[in-house]
Image (cartoon, coloured by chain):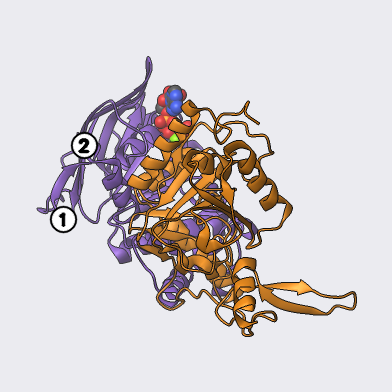
Chain colours: A orange, B purple
Amino acid sequence: MSDYNFAYLDEQTKRMIRRAILKGVAVPGYQVPFASREMPMPYGWGTGGVQVSAACLTPEDVFKVIDQGADDTTNAVSIRKFFEKTAQVSVTEHTKDATVIQTRHRIPEVRLTEDQILVYQVPIPEPLRFLEPRETETRKMHALEDYGLMHVKLYEDIARHGEIATAYAYPVKVEDRYVMDPSPIPKFDNPKLESAALQLFGAGREQRIYAVPPYTKVVSLDFDDYPFDPSKADYPCALCGATESYLDEVIVDDSGGRMFVCSDTDFCAGRQEAAA
Amino acid sequence: MTKNQNIPERPPLLEVHDLTKNYGARTGCADVSFNLFPGEVMGIVGESGSGKSTLLNCLAGQLEADSGAVMFDTRADGPRDTRLMSEAERRMLGRTDWAFVHQNPRDGLRMRISAGGNVGERLMAVGARHYGDIRSAAEDWLTRVEIATDRMDDRPAAFSGGMQQRLQIARNLVTGPRLVFMDEPTGGLDVSVQARLLDLLRGLVRRMGLSAIIVTHDLAVVRLLADRLMVMKDGRVVETGLTDQVLDDPQHAYTQLLVASVLQV
Ligand SMILES: Nc1ncnc2c1ncn2[C@@H]1O[C@H](COP(=O)(O)OP(=O)(O)OP(=O)(O)O)[C@@H](O)[C@H]1O
Ligand SMILES: [Mg+2]
């Protein structure tokens, strides 16, 4: 595939994306507009994340892709293959070995390090969107730190469900300044947003990039009398016995049998190997 | 201009100098100056197109005036020209010391948020973070505007026009503002609903000692609520004075016409 530039995008485009990333790093949680390019995959398949990954990858990088915690879904496999072909980088399923990890909807269970970059695929970057459809207005609200509405959303949750029912894309405040949508990760993952790794968020269709630099303060919004609760299942993983991981429900037979297993497949496999 | 003997010695809450706003070649409002003292209710009347809403929106910072000054007596720094404030400062005023009641409740309410959420929004905007406290404050205010608290979790879309307007008032007054702007607060409501709303507004204004500027077509509204009156025509103030004086003994020919036309109805 030598007819592609390294990592598919031309150098000009990658420079433009890197500038947006640097701006995002300089202003944590702030959504930086960028000129999203057509990618050889439809929107909704991680075009934003792919462009950010393309701008970050170097030939020495080891690349991993996860989709809802798993390395082996169609989406994860095709993105991994895409960069194997266009950037000839080595790939891995092991979180520990990866230097760049592109993810959809999860943060790996293993604590990430300063040598790693986590790239999120983001469908809707604007946390205020559901409350205020006008882009001009949401931009002004961010600029003026006018975030009362965010708590109105949580208030409505409690009024209707008796608790904050938001389970995914749970809004956070970054470095005491910008309110940010962490993408549709489960709120279970929110505490891991405070990380040693650089975290980059790419929204292709919405043309936004934002970032959480290493060791940035990230606080999940809540009320004093309804504090944020990352919540987890009350049982261990059926495969590895882990009690501290995020579990997926899996249907195991035709008669409604089900079990709960780690959503992070690499984490689970590693624990099973260690136990064997 | 009638000299008002009742002007208190306190500094004005709002001091307006030569406020002018044009829409291209057309006059919105021109050279408007007046003072509003704490606890005072000012009515603005005039025919359609006379510039009432333009003036009110310029005063409340919702519309940018072309020239003039709007000095507001801020809690922290005393009188400041709101036209020279940053947008962030103006917005902060807009959710603390100022309130704006729109004619159409849809412009002043969030229709997809529950009544309680609508009332609580201003509290949360200024940092309230205790759900239970926010809820009690909302409950208290719904009661004060005569909305049954069992409607607290309903959306305003399910409310009658009069209820929506009362909800809008509760939502605005919950942070204890010092100055309330109202544009035709009783417009679009039928007569019996208007009467109830007026009664409620009068009670709130008197009890809370609110300062307010009320724009209306309806001389009955100002008769009931306003201490003083400004009469506008073609964007200019043609007469001001104590409400009863202006209505009972209008000096300007236009005001005479306005009062007479109402009496004929
Ligand atoms: N956005 C605008 N663009 C152009 N002209 C405007 C605009 N808004 C108001 N005007 C004009 O400015 C003048 C004053 O209008 P304004 O809406 O302030 O009057 P009003 O006294 O509030 O009238 P009403 O009683 O009908 O609400 C009118 O001539 C009006 O046509
Ligand atoms: Mg008007």
Residue A264 against residue B105 in the figure, above or below: below
Return the residue at label 2. B84
Where A138 falls versus A149 (above or below)?
Answer: above
Which residue is more in the foreground, A159 or A80?
Answer: A80
B175 or B231: nearer the eye?
A: B175
Q: Is residue B73 left or right of residue A224?
A: left
- Chain letter belonging to callout 2: B
Query: What's the residue type where badge 2 is placed?
Result: Leu
Q: Is residue B187 at least partly visible in the picture?
A: no
Q: Is residue B226 above or below residue B126?
A: above
Image quadrant where residue B55 sits: top left
The subunit letter for the residue under badge 1 reads B
Compute the Cα span from label 2 to label 1. Answer: 16 Å
Locate the C terminus of chain A by quadrant: bottom right
The x and y percentages for residue B81 are: 19, 40
How many numbered markers are drawn? 2
Residue at which label 1 appears: B76
Left or right: B92 in relation to A240: left
Where in the figure is residue B134, as x and y percent of width and height?
Answer: 42, 71
Q: Of A16 and B167, which appears nearest the observer? A: A16
Identify the residue at image location x=38%, y=30%: B51
Q: What is the secondary structure assignment of the residue under circle 2?
A: helix
Q: Residue B63's x, y, as percent?
A: 36, 34
SS under mark 1: loop
- The crowd level at tag 1 (other Cα within 10 Å; few <14, some 14-19, many 20+) is few
